[in-house]
Amino acid sequence: MDIKKLQEALITAARANPPVDAVPYAFEQRIAAHLRALAPKDPLVQWSRALWCAVVPCLGIMLLLGGWSFTQDLGSSSALDLSQQLEHAVLAEVEQEQALDSTW
């Protein structure tokens, strides 16, 4: 079949059936769903969504542990302050080296 004749037949068939103004129900949602399915998955977007979903449980755990830590500090009057405990832990190696140097 000749391409020109085929093109003319298609154009006359299209002119015989004018487009309808009515849009099928939920047409936009179906097209959007197809476009989302075709879009490439970005790992950064998936990672950020997962992190945002984890915000609420992490905040709850933080508040529970913070409250527990606060009540533990109030209950023991002889315990060192947290800053003093941190200082002793960080400087423990330095104090040991100074003690060893003074013996030589």
Image (cartoon, rainbow, N blue to C red):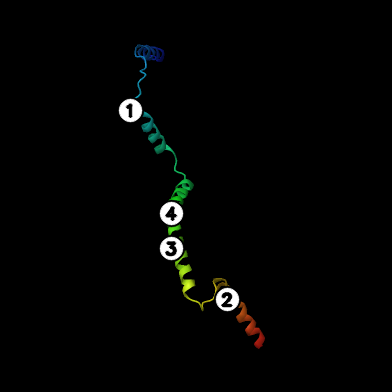
Element type where label 4 sits in the image: helix
Give the x, y percent position of residue 91.
60, 75
Q: Which callout, 2 or 3, points at the residue further toward the start of the chain?
A: 3
Q: Which callout, 3 or 4, points at the residue further toward the start of the chain?
A: 4
- Circles 3 and 4, Cβ within 8 Å, touching? The answer is no
Q: Residues within 10 Å of mark 3 (few under 14, many from 20)?
A: few
Label 2 or label 1, whichever lies nearer to me, is 2
Q: Quadrant of the N terminus?
A: top left
Residue 25 is labelled as: 1
Residue pointed to by mark 3? 64
Q: Which callout, 4 or 1, points at the residue further toward the start of the chain?
A: 1
Element type where label 3 sits in the image: helix
Give the amino acid type for the residue marked by disc 2 in the picture: His
Label 2 or label 3, whichever lies nearer to me, is 3
Q: CA distance from mark 2 to mark 1?
A: 71 Å
Kindly indicate the quadrant of the structure image that contains residue 21.
top left
| Residue at the bottom extreme, as displayed | 103
Residue pointed to by mark 4? 56
Q: Residues within 10 Å of mark 1 (few under 14, many from 20)?
A: few
Residue at image coords 57%, 76%: 88
Residue at image coords 65%, 88%: 103
Kindly indicate the quadrant of the structure image that contains residue 63.
bottom left
| Relative depth, front residue between 33 and 60 | 60
Q: CA distance from mark 2 to mark 3?
A: 26 Å
Q: CA distance from mark 3 to mark 4?
A: 12 Å
